[in-house]
Amino acid sequence: MGLFNTLPTFQRGIHPGDFKDLTRHLPIERMPFSAELTIPLSQHLGAPSKPRVKVGDTVQRGQLIAEPGGFVSIGQHAPVTGTVTAIEPRPHPTGRMVESIIIATDPFSPQTFYNEHPMDWEALSPRELISLIQHGGFVGLGGAAFPTHVKLSVPEGKHARFLIVNGVECEPYLTSDHRVMLEEYDDLFYGIRILQKILDVRQVYIGVENNKEDAIEVLRNHVPDDMACEVIALETKYPQGAEKMLIEAVLHREVPSGKLPIDVEVVVNNSGTITGIGHMFRFGQPLIERVVTVTGPGIKRPANVRVPIGTPLTELLNFCGGITDDTRQILFGGPMMGAPQARLDVPILKGTSGILCLTENEINVREEYPCIRCLRCVDVCPVGLNPSRLGALAKSRDYEHMLDFHVMDCVECGSCSYICPSNIPLVQRFRVAKGLLREQQARNKAS
Amino acid sequence: MLILTALGALGGLTVVLALLLIIAYKKLQVKEDPRIDIVEEMLPHANCGACGYPGCRPFAEALVREEALPGKCTVSSDEGRQQIAAFLGVDVGASEKQVARLACGGGINVARNRARYQGLQSCEAASLVSGGGKECFWGCLGLGDCVDACDFDAIKLNAFHLPVINEDKCTACGDCVVACPKDLLSLHPVSHRLWINCKNLEAGDEILEECKVACTACGRCAMDAPDQMIVMKENLPVIDYRNYQDTTKPMERCPTGAIVYLHPQKGKITGPKARPVIRTSARTDAPT
């Protein structure tokens, strides 16, 4: 590589330390089933699922226990063989009580799957495949938990030309996608074939940051000969895993404000999701477990763990040796966009990519100072907003004026808050503003 | 000589332009109902939007067009509304004075915390992070978004981080109702004195661990209330204000003081069976 030979990436963004060495080399372990699992009916964006079982029913591992409650909704499956003990509101990582199905594990069951047959996907039409993915309960496993089938349903009059597999995993600390790409590449390529058929796409790109060199090499060595698939090594930069940034990095196309990737003929999907889809069509197993990186200085034994959905957080932490005494914060997700948790009895969701335990040293709550107009936030904002101006507007609660400065295009990556030398909680204010503006728009629509 | 020419030219120009302006003023004048200005003068100039119009001027226009009645302005005093009604020769359309009411009694002396929230000091921001630090999912976060939203200085946080609404100053504009992320505030006529001071949807005595004044859904108030004025819905009593009677009977057996009587002078009164809250400082595990 020559001196001026740079890797493709997007404009702006930040370079936080990646801290992935804690779990980068650890193979995925399987976690034993806990005695009770909680499956919230709403662990995705969109309408909650509708339960199909009653209290007292016996369910088998992989059996459908809740149906999609609408188009933007998914099916839910029993992650374990056992008995439904309750259907009631339970604590949820978002801090609300959410209607959940509680399953008590049968300790004597062999835990065989409800359906162990591969699906003959080549005989099915794209529409049937999309329905199978919806009922298989697939959401974006990167963290946002957006139902996958919605992304794959290309609207009338639009056409996808490229499929981008998102293997970027730009959040510091997290290594779950990395390990999945290394260990389960055959499921990944199988899943890509299915998505190619659904979308009628030939060209596939797999975007991987160059801090995962082993994954890049393994994927390059195993690309099937008949697949037009290119593994692209990208410069390590945050937030490259955001859909729009990845499209910019790989194809040099910009998704216009308020539009979707399909408007620039691209569909992006997380590598973990595609691996899961591949696994379902190969072995008949829907999304009932996922790989979670349990990491951070506050955990005694960092690990990449395959966890049944609905496992209580405490059980997972205990499986990883427990937390140290000086742990102060536990996040679902990575340090940049993850959600701090207020209680430990919440379940692991489909969108939980990592559990991060931080100690006093990492949290570092600092005092806020006035904006000095250095505009470093403008230099790093990946969508090209002016966080400094928006921050001033948000502080004076002039939310409607923020619309003129395109606050709704904010991807909430947190780069501005990270870089701000005055420690201004910019992205936090934008999230509040966006929430209030969305509420207001809903009210206006209703009235 | 030169100076006279200049003066003459400018003077002439002044006269011509002045004439133009006079003609334009006469020709292009928009006839506006003079009553609008007078009515606007009578309105409180709060521009709060509680009437449903963007501000006091558009409301005055609507009043003069007789699209709205003066009673819609909740900020004016009774005399003010009557004055406007008399001036316009319309009905007051009087509605009873409304005030904002908070449905939570969980101050830091009685409510427990499950995590310490260190982020942006705003209820809206705290509720985005795992619902805020309070053990009770439904409870007041005590960071004062309603205080900031109030234009009339009617809400203050008390020593236990609970908003207290000054009924005299409250104009029922509804800004605090919108600001509260936990939907704890609502507008009620002042005569609704019996009040359910809790929104916790859980049942049983275990929730007293979370908050000493929570409603345990025992249902005694519903049993004691005359004419089925109170019914239990989703583990909470609901007062049917349509057949409301001004009585303190339903709260007499309440074990926690979750149902209160809002006395105009004495403030919140709990029933005699309610466990007294003697703590005057924050619980050690209270929200910070």
Image (spheres, coloured by chain):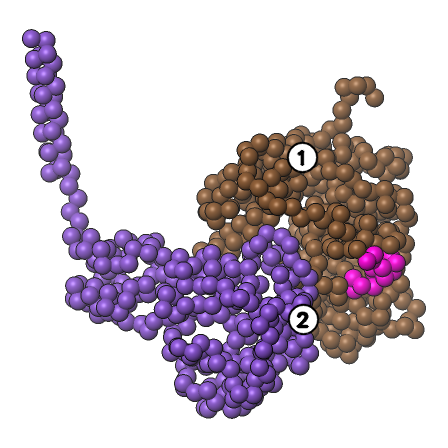
Helix, strand, or loop for circle 1? Answer: loop
Give the Cα distance between marks 1 and 2: 40 Å
Q: Nearer the viewer, residue A382 or A249?
A: A382
Q: Nearer the viewer, residue A193 or A409?
A: A409
Circle 2 residue: A89
Colour chain B appears in: purple
**Number of labelled discs?**
2
Q: Can residue A260 be seen in the rendering of this structure?
A: no
Could you tell me which chain the residue with mark 1 belongs to?
Answer: A
- Quadrant where the N terminus of chain B lies? top left
Residue drawn at 40 percent across, 60 percent down: B153
Pick whichever of labels 1 and 2 is earlier in the sequence.
1
* Residue A322 forms part of the magenta stretch: yes
Instruction: Give the quadrant of residue A252.
Output: top right
Could you tell me which chain the residue with mark 2 belongs to?
Answer: A
Circle 1 residue: A13
- In x, y percent, where is residue A275? 81, 48
Magenta-drawn segment: A312-325
- In x, y percent, where is residue B96? 33, 73
Helix, strand, or loop for circle 2? Answer: strand
- In x, y percent, where is residue A235? 76, 31
At label 2, counting other C-alpha atoms closer than 10 Å, the crowd grade (few under 14, some 14-19, many 20 or more) is: some
Q: Can residue A389 be seen in the rendering of this structure?
A: yes
Q: Nearer the viewer, residue A37 or A157?
A: A37
Instruction: Give the quadrant of residue B23.
Output: top left
Chain drawn in brown: A
Name the residue type under label 2: Pro
- Whether A56 is drawn above or below A282: the answer is below
Name the residue type under label 1: Gly
Left or right: where B192 falls relative to A304: left
